[in-house]
Image (cartoon, rainbow, N blue to C red):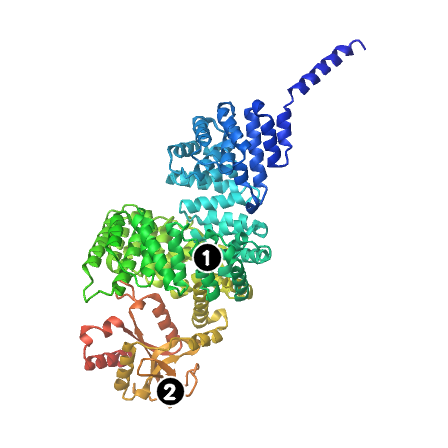
């Protein structure tokens, strides 16, 4: 008993000390349920607030805001509260007493509470954090980097120091959230080596993370967007993580992810279908302008007519409540969906008009472009927009801004090129990328066409500008030494100026840097050659060599772009069979992972090249795949939708004709009839000339049929029949199609026959096809793959095919009637005899 007394006495003393050391202010702060309680405690305890109290108070204030939806936050009220100013003063005085984590937390929180970056508190917090940056825990370092990134300090020496720390400590990072935040912050400063190391590291960490934390994957996608890296395997992995969270995402986060995907040209079928379903669910809940705008922008382009009408009606009701940025987003979405709702277009245009004074230069340009493409009819409004755009242009010093403003001004009604505009454009040309230079060329071409003062020769002001433009383009290509930078600048370049002025120089540059073609960029080079329609055999051979050598490193879906120019441009590299075979072997195990539309395009490209992998054909022509393709097509833009449908039909036809052993049915008859019904129904003057000449060569115009529809819905320019003695056979009925004086085709009394009549014994059906310049490579008389595939198919259908290249028909040698007739006789009769 007596032995227990000292113990009890000691226990009582320790309890008294514990009670005395309790921080009652801190405990009271931690149980506050709102900002006013925090401010009340701060006001009552100003004199005894410690650094820990200040850190806790700012943390509580931000926590209350973060827990509320964006539109219900009261950041301005908090920021302007007198006691918040007290907190800021106290924080500034106690910076040196804050530990490392608290220091960065306070910086992060005051910035989130809208304290200006130039405020002395923010500046001192950043300075102190910089001094401690080498010892900051990685969690705090990532948060510090986010603070700097949000203040647009992307290229600051401090961010460079953080990049260096990241490179040194990368191997020790095991939290994907920390790593992804740091990756976004330093994205503008990473070297190629660090980029590859970051991608490798985050790829490993994504496998170990909780899939529910989709924001980690979203940040990785944002990093790839920032560095313009289309790393397909990593994108696919991030997409699989994001897909699991789509059913729980709100419209804002869906919009962010969809925007990132669009920037990276990443078009995933499963994501689009999941997002479409989720956004349709959110329509009923999106009753405020903010959430509705986000739903409209993403869902509108992929919605069917019924849902789109519903969205448009709601947009009309909410139009007056839209903010400046919401109105801008809506008008661009209307342009994307090619809206023809005049009431809605006029309403949104009037809303944007009242905000013109708050919009920045690029915003006004985007609005003007959208309204013009929507065929908005209001000359006064366009005049006002032109005036504002001109003022912005005269004050702009950024090449990308001058490019955009110039392009949009050239689109607007009655474009005129003033001397001030010429000076502004001329001032930035030497700083412009090839894509920007191409944009200027297109704009100048519009000005030349629309200049009311133009004569037979373009005015000297245009000539001088074009000369400068041409010189800058050639110099940029001539001095380029990094292939990847050239490919990036040429990614969206097209049009007459590029083809006439830069295409040859571009090919020389690509050949000069040909040793830089690797498995990582081979598909970009291939796409450029396909888009340019230019056959450059050294480049094609290099592509084939790299592909065969490093096929295992090339992502399976990139095989489509890689083999595309060989099929479309009709070029067989050395060991062509090996090249196509390794591509086929690379993608075959992953057929089920392809987007449906991409698989159709891949199979069509192979069919043009006369390759029909059975496993690929079986995958496409089954009910499940076609059902998934139909679902995807409903979410795609109209032009792409129609292109995929056309390619599926052409693939179906090719397989029916060339691979009957696969027993794939022909199920596009009705589709082809619709195409025929909606066709242009016109022929070129050259075709009219050939038609007349054929009638004279064959002795009777009734020996020639025009625009003949064959089985499987090929249209043959001209058809004739020669008997066994090679004498023309007149058709028993006149041609069902006749050419009018204006070059229009119209049907006769009978409907088009799609089953060829039986021929007399020994007779031969002749198909005469005129090949215009589009069917040849740009730089040569090399025929492309598609007309050759048509020739194969017509021969299977029993035709002897006579092809008339445009460069032969329009040559100097065939400048008389007799020469043309002799040419046709030789083509038809001599070739048939041989």
Q: Based on the displayed image, in which of its 4 quarters is residue 749 positioned?
A: bottom left
Quadrant that contains the N terminus: top right
For disc 2, the marked residue is: 761
Near mark 1 (Cα within 10 A), the count class, few <14, some 14-19 or many ≥20, is many
> Measured along the vertical axis of the image, is residue 580 above or below residue 10?
below
Near mark 2 (Cα within 10 A), the count class, few <14, some 14-19 or many ≥20, is few
**Residue 649: x and y, percent?**
45, 70
Label 1 or label 2, whichever comes before in sequence order: 1
Which residue occupies the extreme right position in the image? 1
Element carrying mark 1: helix
Which residue occupies the extreme top position in the image? 2
Q: Relative to residue 585, is residue 318 drawn left or right?
A: right
Q: Work out whether residue 6 can be spotted.
A: yes
> Nearer the viewer's eye, disc 1 or disc 2?
1
In the rendered structure, are the residues bearing label 1 and label 2 in contact, judged by CB atoms less than 8 Å apart? no
Q: Nearer the viewer, residue 281 or 394?
A: 394
Which label number is shown at residue 351?
Answer: 1
Q: Nearer the viewer, residue 524 or 450?
A: 450
């Amino acid at each position: 008993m007596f032995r227990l007394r000292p113990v009890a006495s000691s226990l009582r003393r320790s309890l008294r000390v514990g009670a005395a050391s309790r921080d009652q202010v801190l405990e009271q702060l931690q149980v506050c349920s709102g900002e006013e309680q925090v401010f009340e405690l701060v006001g009552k305890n100003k004199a005894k607030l410690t650094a820990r109290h200040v850190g806790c108070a700012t943390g509580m204030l931000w926590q209350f805001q973060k827990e509320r939806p964006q539109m219900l936050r009261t950041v301005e009220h908090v920021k302007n509260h007198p006691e918040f100013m007290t907190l800021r003063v106290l924080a500034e005085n106690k910076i040196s007493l804050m530990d490392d984590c608290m220091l960065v937390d306070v910086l992060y929180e005051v910035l989130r509470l809208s304290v200006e970056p130039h405020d002395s508190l923010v500046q001192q917090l950043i300075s102190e954090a910089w001094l401690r940056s080498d010892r900051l825990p990685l969690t705090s370092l990532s948060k510090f980097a986010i603070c700097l990134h949000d203040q647009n300090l992307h290229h600051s020496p401090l961010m460079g120091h953080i990049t260096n720390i990241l490179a040194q400590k990368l191997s020790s990072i095991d939290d994907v959230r920390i790593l992804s935040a740091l990756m976004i912050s330093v994205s503008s400063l990473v070297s190629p080596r660090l980029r590859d190391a970051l991608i490798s590291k985050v790829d490993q960490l994504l496998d170990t993370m909780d899939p529910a934390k989709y924001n980690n994957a979203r940040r990785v996608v944002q990093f790839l967007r920032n560095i313009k890296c289309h790393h397909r395997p990593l994108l696919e992995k991030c997409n699989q993580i994001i897909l699991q969270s789509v059913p729980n995402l709100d419209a804002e986060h869906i919009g962010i992810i969809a925007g990132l995907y669009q920037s990276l040209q990443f078009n995933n079928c499963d994501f689009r279908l999941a997002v479409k379903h989720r956004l349709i669910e959110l329509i009923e809940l999106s009753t405020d302008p903010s959430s509705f705008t986000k739903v409209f922008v993403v869902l509108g382009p992929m919605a069917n007519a019924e849902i789109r009408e519903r969205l448009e009606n709601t947009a009309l009701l909410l139009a007056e409540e839209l903010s400046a940025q919401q109105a801008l987003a809506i008008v661009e979405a209307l342009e994307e969906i090619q809206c023809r709702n005049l009431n809605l277009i006029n309403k949104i245009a009037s809303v944007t008009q009242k905000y013109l004074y708050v919009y920045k230069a690029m915003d006004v340009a985007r609005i003007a472009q959208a309204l013009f493409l929507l065929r908005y009819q209001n000359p006064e409004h366009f005049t006002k927009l032109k005036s504002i755009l001109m003022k912005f242009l005269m004050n702009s010093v950024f090449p990308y801004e001058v490019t955009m403003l110039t392009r949009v001004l050239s689109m607007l009604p009655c474009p005129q090129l003033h001397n001030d505009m010429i000076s502004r454009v001329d001032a930035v040309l030497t700083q412009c990328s090839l894509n920007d230079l191409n944009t200027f060329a297109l704009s100048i071409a519009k000005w030349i066409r629309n200049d009311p003062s133009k004569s037979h020769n373009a005015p000297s002001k245009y000539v001088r500008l074009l000369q400068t433009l041409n010189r800058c383009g050639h110099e940029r290509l001539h001095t380029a030494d990094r292939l990847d930078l050239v490919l990036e600048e040429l990614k969206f370049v097209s049009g007459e100026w590029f083809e006439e002025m830069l295409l040859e120089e571009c090919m020389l540059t690509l050949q000069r840097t040909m040793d830089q073609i690797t498995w990582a960029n081979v598909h970009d080079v291939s796409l450029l050659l396909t888009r340019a329609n230019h056959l450059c055999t050294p480049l094609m051979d290099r592509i084939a060599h790299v592909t065969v050598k490093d096929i295992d490193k090339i992502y399976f879906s990139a095989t489509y772009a890689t083999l595309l120019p060989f099929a479309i441009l009709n070029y067989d590299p050395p060991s062509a069979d090996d090249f196509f075979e390794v591509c086929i072997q690379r993608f075959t195990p992953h057929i089920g992972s392809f987007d449906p539309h991409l698989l159709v395009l891949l199979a069509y490209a192979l069919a043009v090249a006369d390759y029909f992998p059975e496993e690929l054909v079986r995958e496409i022509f089954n009910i499940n795949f076609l059902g998934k393709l139909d679902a995807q097509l409903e979410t795609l833009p109209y032009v792409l939708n129609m292109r995929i449908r056309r390619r599926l039909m052409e693939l179906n036809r090719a397989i029916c004709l060339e691979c009957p052993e696969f027993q794939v049915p022909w199920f596009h008859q009705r589709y082809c009839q619709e195409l025929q019904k909606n066709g242009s129904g016109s022929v070129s003057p050259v075709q009219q000339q050939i038609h007349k000449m054929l009638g004279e060569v064959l002795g009777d115009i009734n020996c020639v049929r025009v625009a003949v529809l064959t089985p499987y819905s090929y249209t043959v320019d001209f058809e004739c029949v020669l008997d066994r003695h090679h004498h023309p056979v007149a058709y028993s009925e006149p041609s069902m199609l006749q050419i009018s004086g204006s070059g229009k085709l119209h049907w006769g009394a009978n409907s088009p026959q799609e089953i060829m009549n039986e021929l007399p014994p020994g007779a031969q059906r002749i198909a005469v096809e005129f090949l215009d310049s589009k069917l040849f490579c740009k730089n040569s008389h090399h025929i492309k793959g598609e007309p050759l595939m048509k020739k194969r198919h017509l021969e299977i259908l029993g035709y002897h095919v006579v092809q008339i290249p445009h460069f032969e028909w329009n040559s100097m040698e065939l400048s008389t009637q007799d020469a043309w007739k002799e040419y046709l006789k030789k083509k038809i009769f001599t070739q048939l005899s041989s």
